Amino acid sequence: MLTKKDLPVINTAYYCSTGARLAPPHPSPVNIYQVASLLARASAKNIENAFNGSNALIMQAIQTLPGLNSAPWINGCMSKMSLHPLILQFYHLAYQHGMGYKAFDPSSVIRMIEELQFCMQTSHYGNSLEKWMGAFDLSKQTLNTTFRALDKNVSGFELQEFSINCDATQNGSLQIEEFKTLVSNEMKKLLNLAEPDKCLAIFLKQEPCLNHRMNMRYIVILQKDFIDEPAGFADLSFFENLKKTVESNSCYVITYDFGYLNGFLVNNRFSKKSPNYRERIRCLKTYLIGTDTLYRLNGLQPSFEVVYSKFD
């Protein structure tokens, strides 16, 4: 269940993970989810009051609609994404009523909202929402199980990242799925040889990007119990073997990424002794899986998976 506390963090994760900060100003999936949620509860009188200047909150939501045309996650500038049923239904209706492109009047907004409210009461919408959240809940459970094991067994850890930027039009193809399996298996093998004691887990986060690209971001969790332990791997030579495997079996390049989840994190080390540890873990989980509440790359399939856990 989404909370108001989650939404600002998901919004930041959207702009960081997709590179959408480089696109023209536009409403994010979070913005449209909030607008749709607000307008779905609005009455005809609320809309009339908004246009008369006595309901600023609803008017602000309505004024977001013309920006839909500039949103890369809608207009085709970003790799195609699957959307939360409320967002999907809302923007379809907005376009049907011409609200993504031009000025509009109270009557057209009222008609659109009435249609939205009707759609949200149908069995089709209810079933779609149940399937959407069911897939999310399973993935969230897997992530929580891994973090509970980390919390129980170590005092701290850090993230190390490897990224492969791919052609998103190939996403879901047999070729990409086989490539993903190859990379995941090779990474598990090499890291268990290079860091058998320190490698606690390997995560894979698939990130939609601008210009029909996507990132396969492998996130390695390394045990670091003390804040003065050296950062990174004890021996990085395994990366040359990993790089050779990736680049000899595809047209893609793997990079050792030092961006702290595309700038989402201030630093990549987590210590249980830190007073803000729980809040930082919550933010990390939001980046990894929270975005899946609103948008994904592969239909119902989550964009996140645990490739390896030392505690399984």
Image (cartoon, helix red, strand yellow):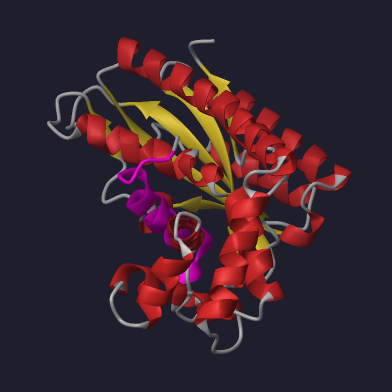
**Residue 169 placement (x, y as % from top left):** 79, 61
Q: Quadrant of the N terminus?
A: top left
Q: Residue furthest right?
A: 174
Q: Residue at x 45, y 74 (%)?
A: 62
In the image, residue 135 lies at what x, y percent? Answer: 64, 31
Location of residue 189 with respect to 41 vertically, above or below: above
Foreground residue, 175 or 186? 175
Residue 269 visible, this orientation: yes
Residue at the image position 54 percent from the left and 21 percent from the top = 142
Does residue 12 belong to the magenta stretch? yes
Residue at the spot 41% in from the left edge and 36% down from the top edge: 285
Coordinates of residue 205 in the picture (x, y in percent): 56, 42
Instruction: Give left or right: position of 167 versus 302.
Output: right
Q: Main secondary structure of the magenta part?
A: helix
Q: Which residues are magenta?
A: 2-21
Please give the count of numbered marks on the rendered protein: 0
Percent across and percent down for residue 55 are 31, 72
Query: Is the C terminus in the top left, top right, bottom left or bottom right quadrant?
Result: top right
